[in-house]
């Protein structure tokens, strides 16, 4: 019988992300997948801005962007006269676009990163069952021949997809499906009047169809054809069938050819009632399924993995209280519910446009007018890009929320955007590049209006906390103006005023930034820091962590 700290089931984007983040945080896991080889074709095609921000922590984003197609947004309009465009530059991210890139390419990059960290995928192993007691999970595995073995782990993360055997066996029941039908998908070359750039969504009396441009002039067609949604997904699909659907829905001539992949699939919108059963956690498609109208599924899974993996690693290493794991379900299930509602809303709009020509014209006009306003653009682009994901609702965030802040200032549970900082001798420094070294960042902010006494008190407390919690807590002081502070705390300059404007910082504020790029808390009283940190960190000796 093998032993592991963490067993991760499923080597898709969610499982691979969990494995690389566990490894980056210093915990080796066992990652299994029942497929003998990586999947050649897959449904997911879009990486959203928030996923790219987090993948930057592993140095992957620049290469992914280089290999993919940058779509600036998507158009919900019924025709050229009534555009309803959502533009991603409203997100305020360094990645103001939807990156269309095959899941195969994304998985290859994640697997290569896992190899750099000393890990690998054990292929041809299927999870048959898992039982748990108060301290461990005992998993039964089977290889391709049916021979069984067992593996004992402190925790199990089920990223095994929609057919998870554990989600029905460990107290988690699927909520009712809001939609259950068959859709068409095809990766094809397209010739005609297809507008390049934006993802295009079209509707007619026959249904709704999305066209997503990606590499080498190929286009992904995703069609919800009302005349074909009752056909079983196992029924063969020919290129001519897809062409007939395209002709019936797309309002301009478009010929498709040379399919790389063509299939039917069952489109579902569903969510588990809980993402945790004792020492077993659910992430990705094992926890949620979304109708693919807004490219949310893979991105939500990647962020599930980031949220959970660092918490598991720190609990396993004795550097955080076990109660921290409770926050995974509380934080991510709420995100899953909000994402399901978004997916359902967009799909209903999509299908209702198809079922009524009048609705199609009116909704496009109303959407176009609404999307011409900044607040609506910011809301929808933030939801779709997932840069608007926050954990303000959780008990921990509520307990550590700083009162009386303006709405523009970030608070406990909010996403921390990447910040442009500068070293005191001039070179630019990005916050998310600093975060590539695992750990929390405790960031103090001072300006010329901060008294010398307060600066010294802040530096003394930051230095003491750094020594107490090293290496998992790194401290830095950011100056709005003035000369560098001398001492053992890294000092940077807020050259672009990002800390001032994006964080809503005030002189004397201190921010604790979590390893997944969310704000744990902020305070203007250095004396409270030790108490606030107690919910997140346990001051014990730690093994070295790898970058």
Image (tube, helix red, strand yellow):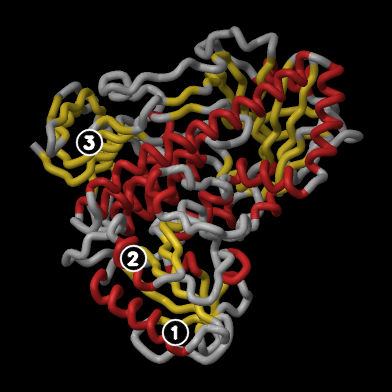
Q: Earlier along the polypeptide chain: callout 2 or callout 1?
A: 1
Q: Position of residue 229 (x, y in %)?
A: 62, 12
Q: Which residue is mark 3?
A: 279
Q: Are marks 2 and 3 in contact (CB under 8 Å)?
A: no
Q: Quadrant of the C terminus?
A: bottom left
Q: Which mark is residue 547?
A: 2
Q: Quadrant of the N terminus?
A: top left
Numbered disc in front, either 2 or 3: 3
342 displayed left or right of 455: right
* Mark 2 neighbour density, 10 Å: few (under 14) some (14–19) many (20 or more): some
- Judged from the image, the secondary structure of the residue bearing numbered disc 2 is loop
* Mark 3 neighbour density, 10 Å: few (under 14) some (14–19) many (20 or more): some
Establish if 442 lies above or below 76.
Answer: below
Q: Which residue is mark 1?
A: 455
Q: Earlier along the polypeptide chain: callout 2 or callout 3?
A: 3
Q: Determine the CA span between mark 3 and mark 1.
A: 44 Å
């Amino acid at each position: 019988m093998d032993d592991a700290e963490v067993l991760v089931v499923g080597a898709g984007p969610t499982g691979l992300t969990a494995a690389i983040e566990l490894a980056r945080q210093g915990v080796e896991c066992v990652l299994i997948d029942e497929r003998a080889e990586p999947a050649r074709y897959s449904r997911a095609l879009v990486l959203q801005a928030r996923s790219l921000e987090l993948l930057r922590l592993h140095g992957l984003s620049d290469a992914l962007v280089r290999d993919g197609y940058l779509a600036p947004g998507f158009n919900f309009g019924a025709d050229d006269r009534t555009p309803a465009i959502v533009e991603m530059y409203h997100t305020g991210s360094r990645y103001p676009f939807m990156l269309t890139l095959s899941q195969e390419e994304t998985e290859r990059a994640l697997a290569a990163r896992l190899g750099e960290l000393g890990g690998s995928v054990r292929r041809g192993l299927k999870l048959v069952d898992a039982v748990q007691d108060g301290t461990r999970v005992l998993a039964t595995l089977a290889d391709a021949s049916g021979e069984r073995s067992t593996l004992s782990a402190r925790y199990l993360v089920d990223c095994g997809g929609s057919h998870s055997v554990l989600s029905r066996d460990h107290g988690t029941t699927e909520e009712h499906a809001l939609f259950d039908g068959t859709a068409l998908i095809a990766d094809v070359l397209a010739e005609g009047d297809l507008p390049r750039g934006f993802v295009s969504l079209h509707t007619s009396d026959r249904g709704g169809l999305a066209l997503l441009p990606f590499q080498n002039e190929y286009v992904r067609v995703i069609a919800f054809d009302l005349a074909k949604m009752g056909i079983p997904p196992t029924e063969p699909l020919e290129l001519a069938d897809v062409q007939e659907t395209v002709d019936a829905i797309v309002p301009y001539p478009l010929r498709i050819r040379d399919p790389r992949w063509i299939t039917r699939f069952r489109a579902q919108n569903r969510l588990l009632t809980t993402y945790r059963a004792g020492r077993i956690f659910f992430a990705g498609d094992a926890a949620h399924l979304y109708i693919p109208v807004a490219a949310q599924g893979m991105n939500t899974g990647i962020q599930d993995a980031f949220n959970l993996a660092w918490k598991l690693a720190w609990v396993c290493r004795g550097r955080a209280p076990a109660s921290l794991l409770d926050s995974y379900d509380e934080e991510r299930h709420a995100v899953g519910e909000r994402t399901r509602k978004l997916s359902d809303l967009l799909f209903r709009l999509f299908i209702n446009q198809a079922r009524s020509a009048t609705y199609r014209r009116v909704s496009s006009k109303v959407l176009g007018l609404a999307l011409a306003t900044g607040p609506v653009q910011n809301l929808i682009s933030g939801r779709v890009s997932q840069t608007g994901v926050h954990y303000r609702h959780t008990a921990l965030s509520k307990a550590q929320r700083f009162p009386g802040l303006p709405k523009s200032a970030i608070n406990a549970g909010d996403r921390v955007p990447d910040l442009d900082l500068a070293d005191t001798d001039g070179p630019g420094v990005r916050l998310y590049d600093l975060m590539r070294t695992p750990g929390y960042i405790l960031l103090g902010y001072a300006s010329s209006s901060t008294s010398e006494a307060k600066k010294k008190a802040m530096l003394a407390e930051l230095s003491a906390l750094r020594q107490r919690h090293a290496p998992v807590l790194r401290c830095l002081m950011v100056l709005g103006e003035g000369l560098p502070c001398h001492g053992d705390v890294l000092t940077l300059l807020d050259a672009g005023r990002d800390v001032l404007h994006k964080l809503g910082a005030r002189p004397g504020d201190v921010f604790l930034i979590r390893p997944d790029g969310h704000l744990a808390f902020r305070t203007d009283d250095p004396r409270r820091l030790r108490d606030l940190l107690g919910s997140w960190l346990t001051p014990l000796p730690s093994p070295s962590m790898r970058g």
